């Protein structure tokens, strides 16, 4: 066969290197330690001029199809019986996919301080939503002389503010409730205010806050089949318990309100807890389908596993509680697009109307940017007054100062709940669950039945059910050095997905072992240490970038801190909402490549050599389809998913290396043991999931 030659090949190479019978003699020349290889295989042309958006382009039509199915299902939901069945099913699905809720334990609530203001009183409250998991909040209570007890109760959730309940606008909306005769309980979410979950206890300083911290909690929760939202929702449910426990709060119907991240929490709470009779969710509700199509699915608690696949959009949080009074607060210039908000409102309004209660849902819009401005604060309180207190009055917020300083509103002595005696963090609770699950798995070794569950969890089809890969493009064989040739191949396992690869072969070999080389750092990032020795040993190496790695790696997404969670969190959460996993996608990539290699005349056997995050899909491929592979070599393999949970906020395992609920069925060491029993595992090294300090 005629071949091109590499123009920078050293002329004296033959004197330095001779490959005979798979053995190498002499020193490895510089031309091989620093080869001149193509910068990329895709070439940066056509529809793949920006390969880093490949996964987004591939996922978007699936989101559009899910949205179409959602709209079609909505139109079939008309009778009271059909609506009730839908509400029940969606509520059950939601709770199932965040892992259910903990058992109710004593609140151990106590009042730690009291402030008297002009027209209302502030009581500082500390309670435990779970044993040792402290929640800080402040009760804003009306003037007894003006509004006799008991008062209607409203729970207010904070958005992503560093100081939580101390943020001025959250204090003002709570105070406005109290000034109009309602008791408002303003609580700190996890990782805000006094409730930071990752703390340097010696320095008494938080190490992560708000969005970033919620995402850090998310990765361990995913592996447990939980969600950051599970913690937030349960804290609020226990907040309702506290309101119901007070003698000065009316028994029966309660209200819930919040903005931004607090709007998210309110949306969940009002959909799941029947005690919320009146709700106002501001600057959040729009469309998850729409956000994903903009490549903006937001952070951990705003994405519930599989919710797009089984038909839950933002409007559903309103419709799941219909016909209870519900207010959507919105801002014309919000980053949550106002057009999406109005579209979702119209769907919810029509369903309320079908039930005969169209007047029970409303939308308030302020000509402003994202935030709990005066217009939305007044709209929230007026809505609560109308439906909760049964009073129809115009509400106007006074101009005077209503808020206090962060120091004054502090509930705990040190300003951090984790410094309280016996305090525990969400990371601690995740660790407890991971250890409990490990004990259960230790008593139940892997079986064929377990493997079937793993397929289902990771969404991995059988190799026999996968289509044959197409060759999108293929270059000529080129001589890299005496005795070594390579070619560029771009595989297309399915429409819109391209896998760029370089295939290296010993020249003249009729049949040779074929190695699929997978490295999340790029297909040739370890050329000298990994790929070259295999070629010198007489093997052909297919070095490939699986989807979302190497040339198609999504970059530039700082919202999900790449140092901890990888650079492709947005694409990950889009797949997550569709009920899919990147582990499953990449495992199937390996399987179709293995099938292709099996059918090549020069193939003696198929092996995998995987590095770092590449070890996870490679391990799944061999465990589930062992007959395709002669051997699996793992280098820098993650020691376990349990280790990810153990390292908590210091874990640096990418989101794309997780499987929702995996630890309820299996862990990586158990898969490795399964492959080892088959005599096919070569484990070179392992790594822990921890950011280097």
Image (cartoon, rainbow, N blue to C red):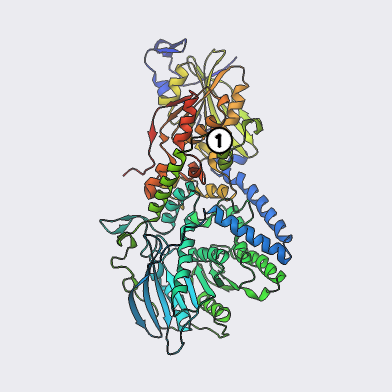
Q: Which residue: 49% across, 28% down? A: 675
User: In the rendered view of the protein, which quadrant contains the N terminus?
Assistant: top right
Q: Which residue: 50% across, 67% down? A: 370
Judging depth in this view, the residue of 147 and 329 nearest the camera is 147
- Judge whether 276 appears above or below 520 on screen: below
Q: Is residue 281 left or right of residue 246?
A: right
x then y, percent, for residue 431: 40, 49
**Does residue 158 appear in this view?**
no
User: In the rendered view of the protein, which quadrant contains the C terminus?
Assistant: top left
Judging depth in this view, the residue of 432 and 512 nearest the camera is 432
**Does residue 191 appear in this view?**
yes
Secondary structure found at label 1: helix
Name the residue at the left extreme: 202
x then y, percent, for residue 625: 57, 29
Q: Quadrant of residue 686?
A: top left
- Residue bearing the label numbered 1: 451
Q: Which residue: 61% across, 65% down? A: 341
x then y, percent, for residue 311: 64, 55
- Judge whether 21 appears above or below 346 on screen: above
Q: Quadrant of residue 276?
A: bottom right
């Amino acid at each position: 066969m005629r071949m091109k030659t590499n123009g920078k090949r050293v002329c004296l190479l033959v004197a330095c290197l001779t490959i005979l019978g798979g053995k190498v003699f002499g020193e490895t020349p510089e031309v091989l330690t620093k080869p001149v290889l193509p910068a990329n295989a895709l070439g940066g042309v056509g529809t793949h001029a920006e390969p880093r958006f490949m996964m987004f382009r591939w996922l978007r039509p699936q989101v559009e199809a899910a949205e179409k199915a959602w709209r079609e299902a909505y139109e079939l939901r008309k009778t009271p019986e059909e609506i009730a069945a839908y509400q029940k099913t969606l509520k059950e699905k939601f709770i199932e996919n965040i892992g259910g809720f903990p058992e109710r334990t004593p609140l151990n609530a106590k009042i730690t301080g009291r402030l008297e203001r002009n027209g209302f009183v502030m009581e500082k409250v500390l309670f435990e939503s779970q044993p040792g998991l402290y929640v800080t909040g402040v009760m804003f209570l009306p003037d007894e002389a003006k509004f006799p007890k008991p008062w209607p109760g409203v729970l207010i959730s904070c958005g992503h503010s560093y100081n939580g309940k101390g943020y001025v606008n959250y204090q003002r909306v709570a105070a406005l409730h109290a000034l109009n005769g309602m008791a408002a309980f303003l609580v700190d979410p996890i990782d805000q205010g006094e409730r930071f979950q990752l703390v340097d206890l010696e320095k008494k300083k938080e190490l992560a806050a708000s969005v970033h911290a919620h995402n850090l909690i998310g990765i361990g929760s995913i592996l447990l089949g939980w969600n950051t939202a599970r913690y937030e929702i349960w804290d609020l449910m226990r907040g309702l318990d506290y309101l119901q426990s007070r003698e000065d709060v009316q028994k029966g119907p309660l209200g819930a309100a919040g903005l931004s991240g607090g709007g998210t929490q309110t949306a969940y709470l009002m959909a799941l807890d029947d005690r919320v009779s009146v709700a106002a969710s501001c600057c959040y509700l729009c469309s998850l389908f729409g956000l994903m199509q903009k490549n903006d699915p937001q952070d951990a608690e705003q994405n519930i596993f599989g919710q797009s696949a089984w038909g839950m959009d933002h409007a559903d949080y309103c419709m799941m509680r219909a016909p209870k009074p519900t207010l959507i607060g919105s801002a014309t210039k919000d980053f949550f697009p106002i057009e999406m908000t109005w579209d979702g409102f119209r769907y919810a309004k029509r369903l309320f109307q079908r039930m005969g209660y169209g007047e029970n849902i409303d939308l308030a819009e302020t000509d402003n940017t994202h935030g709990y401005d005066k217009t939305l604060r007044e709209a929230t309180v007026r809505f609560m007054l109308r439906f909760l207190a049964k009073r129809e009055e115009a509400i106007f917020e006074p101009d005077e100062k209503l808020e206090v300083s962060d120091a004054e509103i502090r509930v705990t002595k040190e300003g951090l709940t984790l410094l309280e005696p016996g305090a525990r963090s969400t990371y601690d609770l995740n660790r407890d669950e991971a250890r409990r699950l490990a004990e259960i798995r230790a008593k139940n070794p892997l079986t064929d039945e377990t493997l079937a569950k793993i397929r289902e969890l990771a969404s991995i089809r059988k190799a026999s059910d996968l289509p044959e890969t197409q060759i999108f493009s293929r270059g000529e064989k080129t001589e890299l050095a005496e005795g070594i040739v390579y070619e560029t191949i771009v595989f297309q396992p399915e429409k819109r997905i391209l896998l760029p690869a370089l295939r290296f072969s010993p020249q003249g070999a009729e049949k040779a072992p074929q190695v699929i080389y997978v490295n999340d750092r790029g297909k040739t990032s370890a050329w000298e240490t990994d790929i070259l020795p295999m070629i010198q040993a007489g093997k052909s190496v297919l070095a490939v970038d699986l989807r979302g790695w190497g040339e198609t790696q999504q970059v530039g997404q700082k919202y999900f801190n790449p140092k901890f969670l990888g650079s492709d969190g947005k694409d990950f959460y889009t797949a997550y909402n569709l009920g899919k996993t990147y582990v499953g996608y990449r495992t199937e990539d390996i399987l179709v490549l293995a099938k292709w290699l099996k059918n090549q005349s020069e193939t003696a056997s198929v092996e995998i050599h995987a590095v770092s995050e590449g070890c996870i899909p490679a391990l799944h491929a061999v465990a589930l389809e062992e007959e395709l592979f002669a051997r699996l070599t793992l280098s820098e393999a993650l020691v376990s998913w349990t280790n990810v949970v153990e390292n908590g906020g210091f874990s640096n395992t990418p989101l794309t290396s997780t499987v929702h609920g995996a630890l309820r069925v299996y862990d990586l060491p158990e898969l490795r043991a399964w492959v080892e029993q088959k005599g096919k595992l070569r484990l070179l090294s392992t790594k822990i999931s921890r950011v280097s300090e």
